[in-house]
Image (spheres, coloured by chain):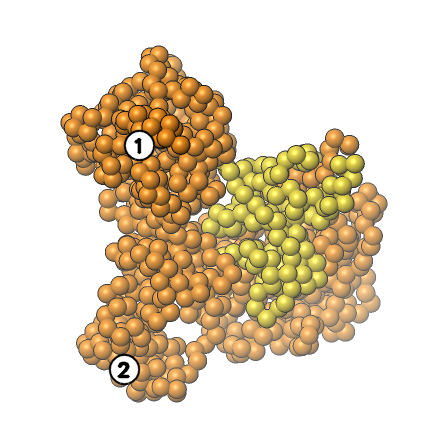
Amino acid sequence: MNAPANFRQVKALPERLVVIGNGMAGCRAVEEILARDPARYTITIFGAEPRVNYNRIMLSPVLAGEKSFDEIVLNTAEWYAANGIELVAGDPVDHIDRERQTVVSRSGRVEPYDRLLIATGSDPFIIPVPGRDLPGVVTFRDLDDVDKMLAAAEGGGNAVVIGGGLLGLEAAHGLSLRGMKVTVIHLMPTLMERQLDEAAGWLLKTELERRGQTILTGADTQEIIEQDGHVAGVRLKDGREIPADIVVMAVGIRPSTMLAKTAGLECERGVVVDDHMVTSDPAVLAVGECVQHRGQCYGLVAPLWEMCRALADHLTDTPSGYQGSVTSTKLKVSGIDVFSAGDFTGGDGHEDIVMRDAARGVYKRLVVKDGRLVGAVLYGDTADGNWYFDLLKRQEDVSEIRDALIFGQAFALGGGAFADPNAAVAALPDDAEICGCNGVSKGTVVATIKAGACSLDAVRSTCKASASCGSCTGLVESLLVLTLGDEVQAGAKTLCKCTSFGHDDIRRLIVEKELRAMPQVMQELHWTTPDGCASCRPALNYYLLCAWPGEYEDDQKSRFVNERLHANIQKDGTYSVVPRMWGGLTNPTELRAIADVVEKYNAPMVKVTGGQRLDIFGIKKEDLPAVWADLNAAGMVSGHAYGKSLRTVKTCVGSEWCRFGTQDSTGLGVKIERMTWGSWMPHKFKIAVSGCPRNCAEATIKDFGVVCVDSGYELHVGGNGGIKVRATDLLCKVATEAEAMEHCAAFIQLYREQAHYLERTAPWIERVGLDYVKSQMFDDPEAVKRLAARFRYSQTFMQDDPWAKRAAGDRADLHQHLATVRPAPEYV
Amino acid sequence: MPKPVRAPMQAKWLDIGPITQIEPGMAATLPVEGGEEIAVFHTMRGEIYALVNKCPHKQGPLSQGIVHGESVTCPLHSWKISLRSGEALGEDKGCVPTIPVKVDAGRIYLLREAVVPPVQAARAAA
């Protein structure tokens, strides 16, 4: 019993602690140990960089010229000396010998240890493209990288930053301030997608572009181009080339585990450690960005401090344990305030609280679960970021202040009364401005309400408060409640739960405010969800498409499946395919091609539709492009039987064959179909042309119907043969075919521009009245001409056969499987 | 033809390729021989989820629905399904199996035992 104890005492001189890594984690760990027990260890620190420890996260301000290197030094040479620490700088450790408990440095120096601390941090991830090793391609990790960038910036010129994450954007900002023309290439569709949601990412992109940077999202790098042995530019997979005098790779970091892995320590993504930062070898510890704790790797500084505390507690025999970290991020780009923390991906039981202030460029989103704040994204106003982060870390119950939470600490905690937004509004003086856009005071709004405006809509139309950008909708609603109590009338139906606006207001504001992209509409009109829902996305996509023909890019992910795959989904998940038959006419070539497709793809059923064409059933989504290629080859195009669009033009045989026919109804039907096919509409749209009043084409239950008579053409609108049968109203009678077509185009355009999404012509006309439609078309003698011209202009962008594009390989990802899983390939 | 994913017995996670194959806001399908087809979702916020590609209501292909927030709306009858739990949201009741997913260095991995049906696994092992 005595002997071992004595032996230990003899040996219990200071233990030897060797630290691999002279960065923020390694040095902080040493500081924490010294603070607890300065005499416990003899300490040696190996560092790869030939300098003392500095604050790596402040490299961005150094690049931007806001700080000098001396200002970001954390531990001076004097500090190492005063604490008896031996610093071996510029001589990285190459090998760990766990049997002998020694490390070997690159220069051959062998250092024995009792305890070893690995703090190797992380390595920048280099994307494996040709040209990645060229001179002029740099990463953004240490001071040497900054020096290279500064040297490049002296000559001005072009810089390309690959990676639109935190690091990449800070590098871009610095280079931009140093006078370079900067292009950021980002693989994903939105910037900083790991920290920001789509809405905040869009605001950030807009601001950076305003500052003169070029931001290319969804851009995949193909190769880095060389000229005269130096980098000259970057080529993207889509063929674009961007000139560059320097290329900064900032696509991400990876835990630096090579040394630990070679030494046989357990590593996954990082060096695996327990709650006391001990690796699979009890004598070896690890800390910082190189570790993986409970499955998590961290690339931020805050978790590192917590790890170092737990590590030092363990190494000084007062173990406390590390529980993992909740992290927050701030972008260090001066003048742009971005903050994100916790889990903002949402999900079951997660409630989003969103506030947008378009005038100030502010977007705030809080995620609450079970009465606790679990995530936050702030853009434009991050003053309350730390408060939210604190609430989040402390898991504090926020139910009491939930309604006022989004307005920030001062408001939410400004006394019990203010936790209720109504009370806060009640406390405002009469001259307080409620609506900034239209300069309306609280007194004016209250007076308007007292004078009889009992709903949000009534207030908007009477005194204009909240009629423009809508950011004060909440305040006006509070004033309605305060003034009227229960007598507040529900407003017009909103488009969906994501917005306080109805369809008409949204359509009007898209045009008035020139909103040209979906995230822009959501920001400017204060959407209460980050990315909308299955109701508003397709509606907005249509409204934008209609408002900005030729400019707005159709968003496939906001399309219902049928319009995305250009076929009709059936109950078993297969699709039906309907080729267009102009006016219901066909020929042997087309019929043969259809018959061949039916046999070739084993279509179990072919059916004649009510719209005078053939429907091929049971086609798999992966076979669709091939089916279309075969149909295209016989001259057929998409019948749009799946779309909120022009479906068919049904005809009878007319004067060409029929003994009662008065006009060439078949010919007119074909002409109308050639004019109108391919146009997207609020809902499906059916046309028919009958050659005489016997009306064999059933034109009087169509959205637009032509009934030919001896003296000309009767034009009918608003019919429907669906759930609720509605016969058409007579719009007018015209004398010539040309006039019939002009009126058809004009009526369609009026419907396209004014109806609500998913509203057929029948309910639309019931809602607005036939007289309204007539006055829109006929009060101004030029109206028909103008409407028809707008329709024809829009059609110049629409009459591309979508099948032909897909058959040629466009968006193959929508049709192909990702892969197939074969459970036991060794037997296949 | 899409390439087959090998599913050797020893691998705990199946690598099904880079995250960039699926545009955010969209989904892709992964047929499993002898098992249920899987739908892999990439949300607008960058999260990856995987579900059996069958709505609990009438077996509609969820992969073809509109993705919004952390849910998908089934293309057949507009049931809203949570991508996290597979449960129907709102008034509807039902649940579709979820498949554990991890993303590492830009690649998507599915938990093997949740993808490959036990019968197949047993046969492969025999």
Q: Mark 1 falls on what kind of element?
A: helix
Kindly report the distance in space between the C-alpha atoms of the residues bearing marks 2 and 1. Answer: 63 Å
Q: Is residue A17 above or below residue A797?
A: above
Q: Is residue A179 above or below residue A746?
A: above
The spot of residue A312 in percent (x, y) is 31, 39
Residue A33, visible in the rendered structure: yes
Q: What amino acid does circle 2 point to?
A: Val
The spot of residue A635 in percent (x, y) is 72, 44
What chain does mark 2 sit on? A
What color is chain A drawn in? Answer: orange
Picture residue at 74% right of the left edge, 30% below the top: A826
Q: Name the residue under label 2.
A: A446
Chain coloured yellow here: B
Numbered circle sitting on residue A26: 1
What chain does mark 1 sit on? A
The spot of residue B75 in percent (x, y) is 64, 59
Specify which label sits upstream in the sequence, 2 or 1. Answer: 1
Relative to the observer, which residue lies in front, A257 or A42?
A42
Answer left or right for A518 relative to A762. Answer: left
Q: In this view, does A35 lie above or below A134?
A: below
